[in-house]
Amino acid sequence: MPSPALQATRALLPLLLAVAGFFHGHAVAVAEEKSLIHLDGKPADPFARSPAKLLAFVFARTDCPVSNVYAPEIQRLHQEFAPQGVEFWLVYPDRDETPEMIKRHLAEFKYPCAALRDPGLGFTKRARVNMTPEVALFRPSGELLYHGRIDDRYADFGKVRPAPTCRDLSIALAAALAGKPVPRATGPATGCFIERLHP
Amino acid sequence: MRAGVVVAIVFSVLTGVLSAKERPRPNAPTFNRDVAPIVFTHCVGCHHPGGTAPFSLATYADVKKRAKLIARVTGSRYMPPWLPEPGHGKFIGERRLSDDEIATLDRWAKAGAPQGAAPDLKVKPQWPDGWQLGTPDLVITLPEPFWLPAGGEDVYRNFVIPGSIDRDRFLRAVEFRPGPTTAIHHAFVLLEHTGQARLRAASQTEPGFPGMDTAGAGSPEGMFLSWQPGKQASEAPPGVATLVQANTDFVLQLHMQPTGKREKIQPTVALYFTDQPPTRAPFIALLRSVDIDIAAGATDYAIEGSYRLPVDVELVSILPHLHYLGKELRAWAELPDGSRRELLWIKQWDFNWQGDYRFAEPELLPKGSTIRMRYTYDNSAGNPRNPHQPPRRVTYGLESDDEMGELWLQLIPRDPAEREVLKRDYIAAVGLPDSISWARAMLRKNPKDAARRSGLAASLLSMGKVDEAKAELEQAVADDPALAEPHHLLAHLYVRQNDVPRAKAALQRSVELDGKNFKSQNDFGFLLLSLGEIDRAIEHLEKAVALNPNDGLAQRNLARARAAKKP
């Protein structure tokens, strides 16, 4: 027969865990949850009632030089694939980037799509993205089809091809639209880590 | 009671486990004590608000949010950008982290980037504010901005700043500022005093003219004026200053990389002069190969070059130049006593960070030393910087997807009186043969390039190879009857052969085809003067002086012609 002390401990364990967890603000706050918000601060759910065939989320930050270099390519991809039913979104995971900064960034770099913030990193984790720029491709159902780099132009920092030899995201978009298996990215992305993902 | 104790113990253990990540690990580096001294010394020169880098690293918050990135780029030595290996030349402005510093940054990132105790922060970030050398004597800029497109490949373009100096001046220092853009990746400040660069730019629809061919603009004699982000201002060595003639044009050769948005390009250049004439005159020597021919797929194609010094020299600065396929560079000197002096070793060339390197103390190389260079190239698909994917055969050329292999050396003879000895020896041993090889390399690419063929002929004439020169000039005339220069050079050839009528006819044809060449106007005027045709001589000599007011020879000839006209 367990002792009263052990019985009490067992009974209280869930409460203890919850209380202990309450005091770990940082670790718990970065829990996996829906955390996308519009620039006006209201919760965002781009999947809800989306008529698109696919949703492409481009993770960016205003001061990542690699992310910025890809702005014309994002414009090109939008031009090619938006008419085919792909809905493009920019996602800014850096909680220090204010809506005003983001609006300026959108205008400066002529992004053709709307922007969301993910300060809680819940969606970033769901999208399995680790840095900017990376892209996550979803079906409206929420099925993640692709996550990773846009192309292979950056082999590494300081090792940049004059032009990409493999346009991973284009290939993934075309395959997904055609109902075919979506290939994985052929290599790792290069860019600015989303460092709060792994404190 | 015992239940309460157990609860307390369990609670404490759980909170302790879950809090571990928030407490700094014992002996982990902290920002205040260990990281700030590194970052504030080696990084904020570029990475500060308004700096040439795309983001600032001037505060703990800035650095913390990029801790892993910093560990990654310093671990690979991508940052700070410094190509030369230690122990092979000691240079001013070295930007290299020690292995310990790199390890500290890595451990700090892995420890969660803790800030540390406030009293441990004993350094402040500092960066140049204002011009590095104080108030400039003159600041020049492009007459109009150039707009770099948002995307696409790198852009190489030359911008002319016409005639900014009202009298001959001695230039002692230059500082280049890119302006509020991160698009300029490196720059060369060049001089041009014949007007040819200005003419080339005038033929374009946008400011400047494209490519690596600078239309004759070159480094000021004795100074390398290169710039990359973070580079200190370029100052001439003690006793050295370069003469810049009045109305000289400055040409800024810029290598620009699109940033994702349209960029306004309008850099400024601060000029510092001295009234003290130079007491020492550097000589710029160039070792290179123009016979580069790299097969597709080759991973270790090599070139070599050498020059044996005829006099004692100080080697003050060194400037390597290769394009995107460049791999490993070595330069060294073999001294007469059999010893070897390492001058430069770059294990992995990066075209984006090219520039000149000034020795902290000039390398003293005695007479009889041989300076050697060896460069390798990677033209395989495994080289991500390869401009051709798939790879293809690459030869020497001026475009960025051609290849080059140059080592520029700033030499100062220990005895100023021996500068002419050095110059004559270098021209005979290296300069003239190289100019012939270079012209032939250019003609292999374009056999119908009559202008290059004329240049080849000029070099052959300098070496006394008259028959070869004549054959090349006759071919140039056949390939391009409208080109003036072959006729100009044929005139020189005929003068050598004492065939004055043919020389006169050739110069007549030359100025008819191109009335804006001050040299041919001067030569024709001088020939007419020698033939007693004074009025026509004055006419052409006045044109020469008007085209190039800096041409002292034309001015003297004109004075003689005018004197000859007087009754």
Image (spheres, helix red, strand yellow):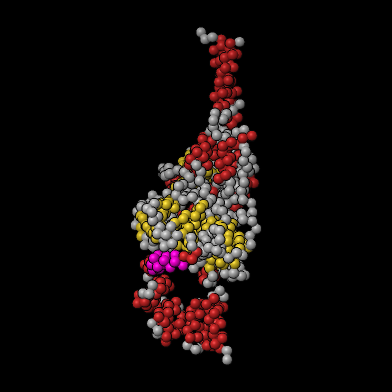
**Residue B458 on the magenta segment:** no
Measuring from the top left, give residue B54's x and y in whole percent.
57, 49
Side of B232 where B513 appears, left or right? left
Residue at 54 percent across and 79 percent down: it is B556
**Residue B429 on the magenta segment:** yes
Q: From what the image shows, is residue A86 above or below residue A126? A: below
Residue at 52 percent across and 77 percent down: it is B553
Q: From what the image shows, is residue A29 above or below residue B291? A: above
Q: Quadrant of the C terminus of chain A?
A: top right
Give the magenta part as a residue range: B420-436
Side of B147 where B434 appears, left or right? left
- The extreme bottom residue here reads B567
- Most foreground residue, B427 or B510: B427
The number of numbered discs placed on residues in the rendered structure image is 0
- The extreme top residue here reads A1
- Most foreground residue, B412 or B311: B311
Residue at 49 percent across and 57 percent down: it is B316
Q: Report whether residue B556 is seen.
A: yes
Side of B2 where B533 appears, left or right? left
Measuring from the top left, give residue B529's x and y in whole percent.
50, 86
Q: Report whether residue B61 is seen.
A: no
- Most foreground residue, A22 or B346: B346
Instruction: Identify the image quadrant of residue B424.
Output: bottom left
Label the magenta part by its dominant secondary structure: helix
Measuring from the top left, give residue A152's x and y in whole percent.
44, 48
Residue at 56 percent across and 37 percent down: it is B34
Instruction: Identify the image quadrant of residue B123.
Output: top right
Measuring from the top left, give residue A23's x and y in whole percent.
61, 26
